[in-house]
Image (tube, rainbow, N blue to C red):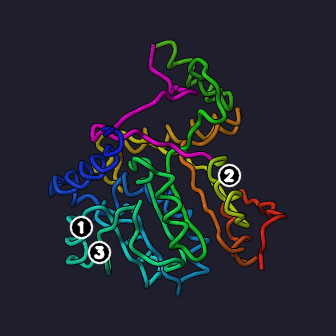
Amino acid sequence: MDNENDSFWLKSYHSHLEHEKSINADRLKTWKQFDTIDAWRHKRMYDSLLPLIHDAEASSWLTVGDGRYGTDANYLIRNNVKNVLATSISDELLKIAKADGFINSFKIENAEQLSFGDNSFDFVLCKESYHHFPRPMIAFYEMLRVAKNAVIIIEPNDVNMQVTKEPKTLVKTKNKFQALKDFIKDLFNIKRYQYNSFNPAGYETLGNYIYSVSEREFEKAALGLDLPFIAFKGINDRYEEGVEYQGTNEASILFDKVKAGIREMDILCEKTGRPYNILVSVVFKVMPQDSMIKKMEAAGFRIERLSRNPYASNS
């Protein structure tokens, strides 16, 4: 018997393909700029790659779901990675990026059915596209298949894995000066930052479920495949409407608001142990060199050497 869910994943990819074709020129222009608040936000995430890049400048990289004008590939290129292939479900924007000299090469690829052979690239990067995939774990196993060294996933963190359903939590004051500021805000009924500790299921207008990730799911996937090493780093991010069009080199209430929001979330995470809202996950297929491990630790990664399957042959 036919089941409409069997073809839902195909419809989902088709809707994302059509969406890439509809991106307007003004929005595209912002992705070429590196001095906007939005570029600053994304650089904070991209910079987590530096410990991997600095030990691997001669390596090959594949970016998956890089339809945002190939910005993932461009970051790698600007940091001296020469061999980078950008891929997405559509080449609509990647063709323009290539013609503009923004990226070196591209290819149309479905994340769940990559056309490359096993171990084709040293590293595979998927940044903020994983949550669009209708069957993300299939895509993850495909990325692992074509990666030789490691897969890096940068995505919203699933705080529900560590935080139960509870009322909104106010950030605790850090010092007397902050306490005075908060008192004044309360006195004049100025809204202070609040963060939900539990996020219900959400969907984007394109129809996809917003799939957030967790350390535990990648740890289990790695253990199931008898992989040796994983690493995680948490980052807080805050989006405000208009960040794409405003620069960081000018006095900006909007930029101050974004930075203040991030600072308050950082305090909340430090004081309560609440997980950061962005998770950088690195799943290694082979043990990285000690120099890379040290650089990752210095950059704030929590590393984990996984126990190996005693019944599997590692020869």
Q: Position of residue 40 (x, y in %)?
A: 42, 56
Q: Is residue 306 above or below residue 245?
A: below
Q: Is residue 93 above or below residue 16?
A: below
Which residue appears at 78% of the width and 67% of the height? 312
- Looking at the rendered structure, the kind of residue marked 1 is Asp
Cα distance in 3D space between marks 3 and 2: 37 Å
Residue 91: assigned label: 1
Per the image, label 3 sits on a secondary structure element best described as loop
Most frequent secondary structure within the magenta stretch: loop
Task: State the residue position of label 3.
Answer: 102
Q: Quadrant of the N terminus?
A: top left
Q: Position of residue 95 (x, y in %)?
A: 21, 72
Residue 289: assigned label: none
Give neighbour class at mark 2: few <14, some 14-19, many 20+ (Cα, 10 Å). Answer: few
Which residue appears at 78% of the width and 73% of the height? 313
Q: Is residue 205 magenta?
A: yes
Per the image, label 2 sits on a secondary structure element best described as helix
Camera-nearest label, 3 or 1: 1
Q: Residue furthest front?
A: 1
Q: Position of residue 68 (x, y in %)?
A: 31, 60
Residue 107 falls in which quadrant of the image?
bottom left
Q: Position of residue 290 (x, y in %)?
A: 76, 76
Give neighbour class at mark 3: few <14, some 14-19, many 20+ (Cα, 10 Å). Answer: many
Give neighbour class at mark 1: few <14, some 14-19, many 20+ (Cα, 10 Å). Answer: many
The magenta segment: 189-214
Residue 220: assigned label: 2
Which residue appears at 26% of the width and 79% of the height? 101
